Image (tube, rainbow, N blue to C red):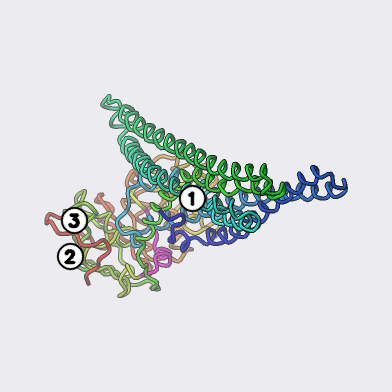
Amino acid sequence: MRPLDPRLLRRSRPVRRFLVATVLLGLVAAVAVVGQAWLLSATVVALVDGVAPTSVAATTAALAGVVAARGVLAWAQATTGTRAAAAVKAGLRHDLVDAVLDQRRTGPAPSSARVATLLDTGLDALDGYVARFLPQVVLTALVPGAVVLTLLAVDPLSALIVVLTLPLVVTFLVLVGMVTRDRLDGRWAELQRLGRHFSDVLAGLTVLTGFGRDSGRGLREVGERHRRATMASLRTAFLSSFVLELFSTLSVALVAVAAGLRLVTGDLDLATGLLVIVLAPEAYLPLRRLGTLFHDSTQGLAAADEALTLLDGERRTGHLVVEGPAPVEVRDLVVVHPGRERPALALPGLTLQPGEFVAVTGPSGAGKSTLLAVLLGFALPTSGSVRVGGVPVVELDPDAWRRQVAWVPQDPHLLAGTVADNVRLGHPAASDEAVRSALVDAGAADLAPRREVGEQGQALSAGERRRVAVARALLRVRDGGAWLVLMDEPTAGLDAERESTVLGTLCRLQESGDVTVLVVAHRAETVAAASRELRVDRPVEVVQAGPAGEVTP
């Protein structure tokens, strides 16, 4: 297994900067290790030989300075690693959120439980990998080499023993690492299984409770499997540390015994013998620490591989921009969701001219909401074409295109803040007067702009949340430059008076001639207010889905 995934190196600039800093710090640390051993042996020899106190004091002061320098280097490596890990996690999370929000980047939408596990606890494993394991890899590559070269210069026999025993320790490190990797792969699989199971139980918690089913039993069983997998991986990690400590200790003992015997026989002077005995453990210490941190590396690499595999599926998004208002044309559109054979939507044709108000009707499951998702770029056509001003939607720059769209979903999402804050999501620079005007035209004149709203619209009813979302869309049209209005049942849950207000506002937008309105509707009043009706029937034929995102003109 590679200690550093090349994809992570290519994608993450913080990792590249961190590796450069780590190599520089590692070079200084290698010099400090040799300097500390030399100064320590020199100090002891000076005390034994009874040299002048001033000379001993100078050597001791230099030794203290080197020890302090090693402490500063350790602190610098830890600080740099922690900051780099935070930057890498933030960058990957940002890229993942951007990718999963646009299927043109990742293809079929990944499992929500998989993404949630990855964004939450999964990427946290990069702390140990980036902050501790990667610096230790650099130290393992530099320090033993510096120690061997120093030993070769002062005592070739000790250098030979170190050179012969180091590969033995590395061999056991690799063998134990392979077992650890398999254990951690099982633990990661159990963690993902637990996340999926928890997501499923949470989604059906109300139904399970209503029917008196024990929703916690399955979670306890999956959690117990995850606990067993975690303990097995920890046992393997502790065993690997024990094996490395054992063989490292035996290797250091060989060097120490050989040097001690030669000291007794007079074949080795005291200064050289002390230097060899002090330096020998430093040759094996980086390997021992690397083995201890290998557990962090495998867990972090597994999370990084999961994230990078998802991001590497990123498709080339379009970069074209269409200035509206422009006609929207749909031809032979078929959308098949991943893992299904029956189409979610089959629409032979649709043309929206600027200034039209079209009501999309049809039975539940006919694909009305899917049509809006395709226009927004959240879903990909399996076949057929969707064009705006003659340009396929899949070739449009997603951010530039969505700035021209005002969208009201079936279940509007509100953020914690005030009513005005949520309306201003449509246009952050809007004035207070513009916000109040949008609320009035959305039938929400009774909602005070300064009224506090909790996360997910807490403290507001379903109808109030919908009216705030409509006001947000209206503000985006009036002040944000949007010209295409997509609404999924905007009058659901509204009384007759407020419904009439919303429909009147949509009719005025349509009459301006610059705004195209497409509304998914079940209510007769909405259909009557529209300039025409588009009937979407439930698809009955079975089609073979091609690769997600494949568009046939």
- In the depicted structure, whether residue 548 falls above or below residue 413: below
User: Disc 1 marks which residue?
Assistant: 422
Disc on the earlier residue, 3 or 1: 3
Name the spot of residue 550 as percent of width and height, x first: 25, 66
Foreground residue among 177 and 433: 177
Foreground residue among 336 and 49: 49
User: Disc 2 marks which residue?
Assistant: 348
> Badges 2 and 3: C-beta atoms under 8 Å apart?
no
Q: Quadrant of residue 450?
A: top right
The residue type indicated by label 2 comes to: Pro
The residue type indicated by label 3 comes to: Pro
Q: Nearer the viewer, mark 2 or mark 3?
A: 3
Residue furthest to the left: 541
Q: Secondary structure at mark 3?
A: loop
Disc on the earlier residue, 2 or 1: 2
Disc on the earlier residue, 2 or 3: 3
Residue 126's label in the rendered image is none
Give the residues in magenta.
396-408
Q: Nearer the viewer, mark 2 or mark 1?
A: 2
The residue located at (28%, 30%) in the rendering is: 208
Q: Is residue 227 left or right of residue 455?
A: left
Q: Is residue 348 left or right of residue 429?
A: left
Magenta run includes residue 321:
no
- In the depicted structure, whether residue 24 falls above or below residue 355: above
Q: Is residue 264 left or right of residue 294?
A: right
User: Disc 3 marks which residue?
Assistant: 343
> Badges 3 and 1: C-beta atoms under 8 Å apart?
no
Spatial CA span between label 3 and label 1: 35 Å
> Crowdedness of circle 2 by 10 Å Cα count: few (<14), some, many (20+)?
few
Name the spot of residue 496 as percent of width and height, x first: 33, 46
